Amino acid sequence: MKIVIIGSGNVAYHLAKAFHRNQMAISQIFGRNETDLKSISAELQIPFSTTSLMDADLYLICVNDDSIGEVSQIISKENCLVAHTSGSLPKEALRGKFRKASFYPLQTFSKSKALDYSKIPFFVEAENREDSELLKNIALKISKNVMESDYEKRKYIHLTAVFSCNFVNHLFARAKEVSDSQNIPFDYFLPLIDETVSKIHEMEPKLAQTGPAVRNDERVLQIHEALINDEEHLKIYRTMNESIKKMYEL
Amino acid sequence: MKIVIIGSGNVAYHLAKAFHRNQMAISQIFGRNETDLKSISAELQIPFSTTSLMDADLYLICVNDDSIGEVSQIISKENCLVAHTSGSLPKEALRGKFRKASFYPLQTFSKSKALDYSKIPFFVEAENREDSELLKNIALKISKNVMESDYEKRKYIHLTAVFSCNFVNHLFARAKEVSDSQNIPFDYFLPLIDETVSKIHEMEPKLAQTGPAVRNDERVLQIHEALINDEEHLKIYRTMNESIKKMYEL
């Protein structure tokens, strides 16, 4: 079975690497960015091309959401399976006469950052049982957590990820602005952050809540509001505290 | 030098344990809750009392912010040092003729959760250099990260902690409501969350930002808004996305 990866960004790189590590041959990595393709090709010993797409049984399109439709049009072959890796697009975003699918790894990828691929949950969806089993088996070569998920469910998965990953990172970025303003190294907060996350591996986040809002400590909330001199910080501060109070009916 | 811990909650327990592990003798643990005191006393071989406060050189008051003032009044001795462990109160919240201080461990404590004490930053403040050196040396028995910090600075430390710990945990709690609504196990999101935090050990949170808002992906933002049927979720969703867009000038 021939597999081709289209794209040369973070997702393409890490999927290629995960396959490589698990002795799954990738026949080609195809894209526009020759520099990135060359670097992936050299590291993982996968042939690359920027011009001639190889004939394959499965194409994995690992490009930005906005480009998926257009990029998929380069696949003229009909008797093949094509999957994109987006959490927020239906498989019908792919344009062509091939069989369409989704192969969604739930993880945040940075090229420079090593990852334990075996822990990444994969959500797959295809037009028929056979394709869906095929994709599940391929994902199972990488990870233990593989599930089917239609587009409706995938939208909620992505939304949950936005709350628990994207927004969380933004809170770190805003928190760092506060500590920077007082020349307090943000590194001092890493043990606290690590422990906050370590806790929810063992207990429900709702039961792990601490801080002034859940204690309904108006004195501290007032002190903090008086300290904050950035409009966005204040909006976040108020929105989060109000939401905490609502959750605990305070 | 005789040290007494007042209180029997999470902070009292973990401080007592951290001292115990580092061969620092605690002369007594004093409080109201006999059950908790007995349990700490049995585990760490520290004498306890609910009625008779022992004479000591240093009292560490580990009780809720609201009780610190009242609890400190039980210390009638004048020639001693008394420190509270609150991030959000000045040392003057202590009431008495003793020398006042603050001994603030920046961490979230749960009784059942083991901690690496050596990584906890301690912020200390006292009325004079001698007391402040004493507190620093005591903290250094537990941790490598010990700094002086006056009340003004401590308020910002606490505010940073609220953003990067309390609010982050609340995002997890809200995210779990989204995944629960679709019967998606929240455990599936733990590798993503772990990676989100792992990343900021290596790079600036601002540079690690991913997600639809920083891509200015209006299509996905609209899809998510249509999915959300909880008012608090929607408020958080909009506030965080607007703040992300502002930060990156989108």
Image: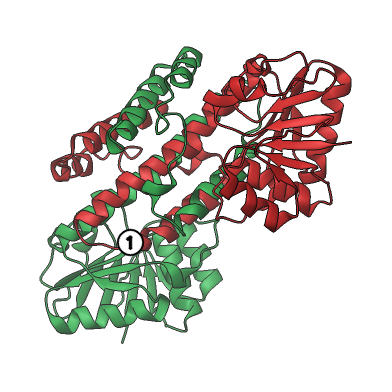
Chain colours: A red, B green
Residue A240: where, in percent of width, then height?
33, 33
Q: Is residue A52 above or below residue B23?
A: above
User: In the image, B247: left or right of B79?
Assistant: right
User: In the image, A242: left or right of B127?
Assistant: right
The quadrant in which the N terminus of chain B is found is bottom left
Q: Residue at x 76, y 36 (%)?
A: A4
Q: Residue at x 76, y 35 (%)?
A: A146
Amino acid found under the numbered disc labelled 1: Cys
Q: Disc 1: which chain?
A: B
Q: Residue at x 31, y 52 (%)?
A: A176
Q: Is residue B65 visible?
A: no
Residue A2: where, in percent of width, then height?
85, 36
Residue A39's image quarter? bottom right
Residue A216: where, in percent of width, then height?
29, 36
Q: Is residue B88 above or below residue A15?
A: below
Residue A52: where, in percent of width, then height?
72, 34
Residue A122's image quarter? top right
Which residue of the protein is positioned furthest toward the bottom in this rendering?
B1
Q: Residues within 10 Å of mark 1 (few under 14, many from 20)?
A: many
Q: Secondary structure at mark 1?
A: loop
Q: How many marks?
A: 1
User: In the image, A209: left or right of A56?
Assistant: left
Residue B91's image quarter? bottom left
Location of mark 1 (residue):
B62
Q: Give the camera-side residue of B50 and B2.
A: B2
Q: Give the camera-side residue of A155 and A245.
A: A155
The quadrant in which the C terminus of chain B is found is top left
Q: Is residue A229 visible?
A: yes
Q: Residue at x 51, y 64 (%)?
A: B115
